[in-house]
Image (spheres, grey):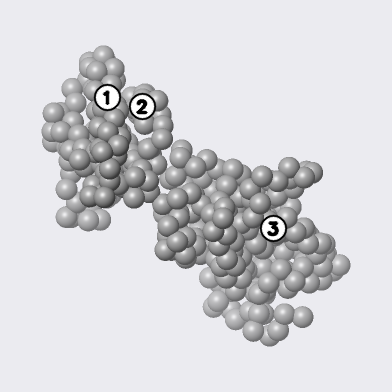
Amino acid sequence: MIGNKAVVTDEEELDIHNTDWTKKYKGNSQVMLKPQNTADVSAILSYCNERKLAVVPQGGRTGLVGGSVPVHDEVILSTSRMNRILGFDESYGIVSAEAGCILSDMQDYAKVRGYEVPLDLGAKGSCFIGGNLATNAGGIKFIRHNSLHANCVGLTTVLADGTVLDNMTTLRKDNTGTDLKHLFIGSEGTLGVITQCALICPVQPKMRNVAVVACSSFNNVLKVLQVAKRELPDVMQAIEYMDLASMDMVRDMNEQTVYPFDQDYNHYVLIEVAQTVDPYDSANSDSQSDYTEVESDRLFNFLETIEEQILVSSSECWPQTAFQYLSSLLQKLIG
């Protein structure tokens, strides 16, 4: 049906796939199957369904809650061999791939074409796009591009009895009937196995910059987010929260890390801003210079709002060096 190469019974290899990334959860599966396409997945699930054999779909195993490892001795269905990128629709900016495609490979594929995948996260070098969809992974660009529900236009899935649901399309505006693919995004493999997908890719920004804001309370972290969403709605690319323990870990792991503040704070906000127009491009016209000047005003208004409404009104003492650091980083964006 799928060939001997797709059947794994080696104890050492099975031990890896029976164990969660955190080493906290461990199953006892005796066999792992590695289908190469949707037809293989359909045949496997049909066979297991007829014999009432439990199956656990498994992707890159980067989850932290044990969702991809067996509870007992279920059959492991790994999508690792289904790793092809199927193509790119230049008209709509949509990339299509199989479920076992590694996220970073998809990102690189889109990047050379001037686009970016709307999902980015720390495990991008090993997580599979099928697992990202099955868990509705948000990632660090969620605030910019929304969830995978908003960016997935096509999906092929296989139900437990082997039935194939082919909703694979690159048509962005498709209002023909019930949109079944959204049932499977975030379903954690409980409704079926995702085998193919198509994602909308926005145009890759030409300018990026990152700033770090220090806050003494989590309430002020939320205020920084509110101001950023109001002042920088079209250029804010990502925003991440870090506590002091996380910052200490970064410094411990990399001694060359330059700490931008003259004292420790309990909370930090990492903000990435990006735009598709490059203000440093010498070919830009006068209108581009006007655009850059407008952006300058908006960004500095953002900084002033943070300083006046959040830090001063709450009687906090934010070191001047921190404000200068944030200003200099964002100033690189506007020249």
For the residue pair 307 and 267, the one nearer the viewer reads as: 307
For the residue pair 256 and 309, the one nearer the viewer reads as: 309
In the picture, the quarter occupied by the C terminus is top left
Q: What SS does tag 1 mark?
A: helix
Query: Residue 301 — which label?
Result: 1
User: Disc 2 designates what residue?
Assistant: 231
Q: How many numbered marks have been drawn onto this rendered protein structure? A: 3
Q: Residues within 10 Å of mark 3 (few under 14, many from 20)?
A: some
Residue at (74%, 52%) from the top-left corner?
Answer: 191
Residue at (27%, 46%) from the top-left corner?
Answer: 284
Q: What SS does tag 2 mark?
A: helix
Q: What SS does tag 3 mark?
A: loop
User: Disc 3 designates what residue?
Assistant: 168
Q: Sequence order check: which comes first, mark 2 or mark 1?
A: 2
Residue 306 x, y percent position in the rendering: 28, 24
Q: Residues within 10 Å of mark 1 (few under 14, many from 20)?
A: some
Report the amino acid beneath label 2: Glu
